[in-house]
C-alpha cells in the first residue's frame, strides 16, 4: 500500500513580514510537498539525486537572498549573535544535503521518509525560530 505523502501545510505563522522571503518560503513548502508526492511512487536513485540537487540549488539561492538582506540591513551589528547563528544554520543545512547526495552517489540506500522528515522539520524550525527573527529585524528597519 502506498504511504501517505508527508505534506507540509503553509501556515500564517510562517510569515516573516518580508515579502521576498515569504514568497521563497512558499515556493519551498510547495516544492517539498511535490517532492513528498513524487517519492510515494518513485524512489529511484536517479530521482533522489535530481530532487536533492534541485532542492539544494533553490535553497542556496534562497539563503543568498536572506544573507544579502542581512548584509543590507546590518544584521550582524544588531548586538547579538543572531546573524552568525543564522548563517551557521544555512551552512549546516547545505552540508547535510551534500552529505545525502554523496551517500546517494556511492550507492547507499537512504530512507526517503527520514529525508522528508529532516527537510520538513528543518524548514519549519528554521522559519519559525530563525527567519522570523530576521524578518522582525528587517520590518523594524524598513519602518524607520
Ligand atoms: Fe534563513
Image (cartoon, rainbow, N blue to C red):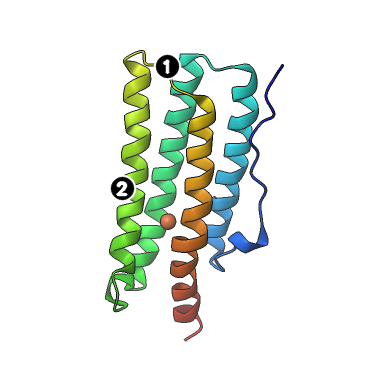
Query: Percent from the top left, x then y, of residue 139?
Result: 50, 76
Q: Is residue 79 above or below residue 87?
A: below
Query: Percent from the top left, x then y, of residue 134?
Result: 43, 68
Determine contact: label 2, label 1, CB under 8 Å.
no
> Quick one: SS at disc 1?
loop
Residue 133, numbered label: none
Label 2 crowding class (10 Å Cα cut-off): few <14, some 14-19, many 20+?
Answer: few
Residue at position x 46%, y 15% in the image: 45
Q: Is residue 36 above or below residue 140?
A: above
Closer-to-camera residue (71/91):
91
Q: Is residue 82 above or below residue 30?
A: below
Left or right of 31 in this view: 50: left
For disc 1, does the CB lie below 8 Å from ligand 1?
no
The residue furthest right is 1
Q: Is residue 5 above or below residue 95?
A: above
Q: Quadrant of residue 82?
A: bottom left
Residue 91, numbered label: 2
Query: Percent from the top left, x then y, of residue 46?
Result: 47, 15
> Which quadrant of the figure shows ligand 1?
bottom left
The residue furthest bottom is 144
> Quick one: SS at disc 2?
helix
Q: Which residue is mark 1?
A: 109
Query: Percent from the top left, x then y, of residue 128?
Result: 52, 60
Q: Earlier in the sequence, mark 2 or mark 1?
A: 2
Left or right of 84 in this view: 50: right
- The CA distance from mark 2 to mark 1 is 24 Å
Amino acid at each position: 500500500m502506498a504511504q501517505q505523502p508527508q505534506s507540509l501545510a503553509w501556515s500564517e505563522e510562517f510569515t516573516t513580514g518580508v515579502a521576498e522571503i515569504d514568497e521563497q518560503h512558499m515556493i519551498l513548502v510547495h516544492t517539498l510537498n511535490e517532492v513528498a508526492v513524487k517519492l510515494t511512487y518513485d524512489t529511484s536513485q536517479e530521482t533522489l539525486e535530481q530532487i536533492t540537487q534541485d532542492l539544494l540549488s533553490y535553497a542556496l539561492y534562497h539563503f543568498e537572498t536572506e544573507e544579502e538582506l542581512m548584509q543590507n540591513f546590518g544584521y550582524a551589528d544588531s548586538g547579538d549573535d543572531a546573524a552568525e547563528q543564522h548563517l551557521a544554520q544555512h551552512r549546516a543545512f547545505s552540508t547535510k544535503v551534500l552529505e545525502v547526495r554523496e551517500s546517494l552517489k556511492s550507492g547507499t540506500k537512504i530512507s526517503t521518509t527520514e529525508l522528508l522528515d529532516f527537510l520538513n522539520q528543518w524548514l519549519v524550525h528554521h522559519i519559525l525560530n530563525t527567519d522570523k527573527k530576521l524578518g522582525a529585524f528587517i520590518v523594524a528597519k524598513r519602518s524607520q
